[in-house]
Image (tube, rainbow, N blue to C red):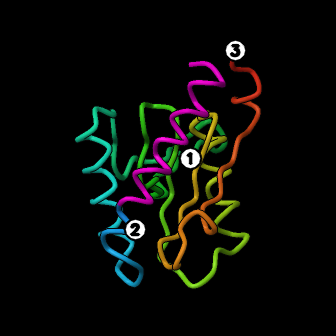
């Protein structure tokens, strides 16, 4: 993928998150938003993997840490969903770590516990994004 394609995909995912939030509002469990966003994305032709295991490699062994990302879209963008009062630095660090381990160029941290999802959505890119062709 190119930087432009990844950026466009991120924009489209954001649109579907807004659609889900407008339909459901704030105050539900994270898992409900996850299922609804997955449904919207699949319905619109995206490749979506849910609850993807994150392998932790340490000292040449794989540690079963039971870490999972919420959604992986088109094998490119990690989407971490929250339904919390406030996004904390640990939530951001978690997503950045997942992006690094899985070597994905972009991540979206989306908090559904808000009146305006665009204010609470945080996109992240890393070194894998920077090496993509323009």
Above/below status of 132 relative to 40: above
Q: For mark 1, what is the residue? A: 56
Q: For mark 3, what is the residue? A: 133
Q: Does the magenta stretch include residue 16?
A: yes
Characterize the local packing of mark 2: few (<14), some (14-19) or many (20 or more) Cα atoms within 10 angstroms.
many
* Residue closer to the observer: 113 or 132: 113
Above/below status of 91 relative to 107: below
The residue lying at 56 percent from left, 25 percent from top is 5
- Of the numbered discs 2 and 3, the one sitting upstream in the chain is 2
Q: Which range of residues does the magenta coloring cover?
A: 1-19
* Residue closer to the observer: 100 or 44: 44
Residue 13 located left or right of residue 103: left
- Of the numbered discs 3 and 1, the one sitting upstream in the chain is 1
Above/below status of 86 relative to 103: below
Tell me the tag on residue 21: 2
The residue lying at 71 percent from left, 16 percent from top is 134
């Amino acid at each position: 993928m190119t930087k432009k394609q990844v950026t466009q995909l991120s924009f489209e995912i954001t649109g579907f998150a807004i659609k889900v939030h407008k339909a459901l509002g704030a105050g539900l469990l994270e898992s409900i938003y996850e299922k609804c966003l997955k449904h919207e994305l699949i319905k619109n032709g995206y490749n979506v993997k849910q609850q993807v295991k994150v392998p932790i490699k340490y000292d040449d062994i794989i540690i079963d840490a039971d870490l999972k990302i919420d959604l992986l879209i088109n094998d490119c963008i990690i989407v971490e969903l929250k339904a919390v009062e406030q996004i904390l630095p640990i939530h951001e660090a978690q997503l950045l770590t997942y992006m690094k381990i899985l070597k994905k160029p972009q991540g979206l941290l989306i908090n559904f516990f808000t009146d305006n999802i665009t204010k609470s959505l945080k996109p992240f890119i890393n070194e894998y994004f920077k090496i993509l062709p323009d």
